[in-house]
Amino acid sequence: MKFYDVVQGSGEWYRLRIGRPTASNFHRIVTPKGEPSKQALPYLYRLVAERLLNETLDDDLGFVKYVREGQEREPQAVALFNFTNEVQLEPGGFITTNDGRLGASPDRMLKGMREGVEVKCPAPQTQVKYLLDGPGDDYRAQVQGHLLVADQFQAVHFYTYHPQMPPYHKVTLPDRHYQAALRSALGAFCDALDVMYERAKALGAYAVTRRAVAPGELAYGESPVKIVNPEQGEDDASA
């Protein structure tokens, strides 16, 4: 695995995610039962578009709001986790497989990068659900995906926090059977992604963002672009 020491939600973090399948979206490729997901093709088109435009499309899925809300409460959750478990968590940054085809963003890591921690700060009713029945299989692809991408991880902690309720804590170990299905599906998806990107790139010119930024910057600031034409090379004109 490769570790990038970036702040999650920053422009650097978004740039690393562009056009790359990430663990939080693995459920769009593989279902919790290890079967192909019907969301795979739309997700593939989205990643092709990100590569072509050098631009994140996370905002289309409400992802930015999720990141910001989680960041607001996450320090409280991490402090409680540290105190309860007598550990010191470190920022998760961004992780890729050695070949760079897949990515993951664990919220935190135990020192030494041996275990990841997924921190969720859900709505009250969702926290009650976790406390009474656990998360079920909702995050199976994501958690097992973290263990797959960050192959040094021996476990992933799923930790949910609400300031008015007890926390929920579950430790997940690698599921070799599920990971075999996940690995196979992700490999096929990445192969298809590369082929579709090359096909799309050859079809004509694209107005490519010169410097990929976080969605907030893209929405409210100027976004200079360059025209990329596969037959004529790059045009320095901006818009």
Image (spheres, rainbow, N blue to C red):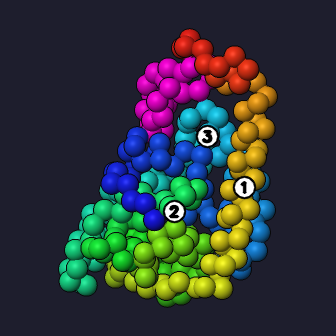
- Residue 228, image x and y in percent? 64, 22
Q: Which residue is mark 2?
A: 97
Name the amino acid, label 2: Thr
Q: Where is 40 relative to 170, above or below?
A: above
Residue in view at x 55 percent, y 13 percent: 236
* Disc with the residue nearer the chain's start (1 vs 3): 3
Picture coordinates of residue 66, whole percent (x, y) = 47, 55
Instruction: Tell me the kind of residue under disc 1.
Output: Asp
Picture disc at residue 191: 1
Nearer-N-terminus badge (2/1): 2
Mark 3 vs mark 2, foreground winner is 2
Q: Which residue is mark 3?
A: 50
Q: Is residue 100 above or below residue 226?
A: below
Which quadrant of the figure has residue 208? top right
- In percent of width and height, residue 42 lies at 74, 51
Count neighbours of disc 3 (C-alpha within 10 A) and say few if under 14, some if 14 to 19, many if 20 or more: many
Disc with the residue nearer the chain's start (3 vs 2): 3
Residue toward you, 13 or 58: 13
**Bounds of the magenta span?**
207-227
Image check: 75 left or right of 158? left
Residue 187 is inside the magenta segment: no
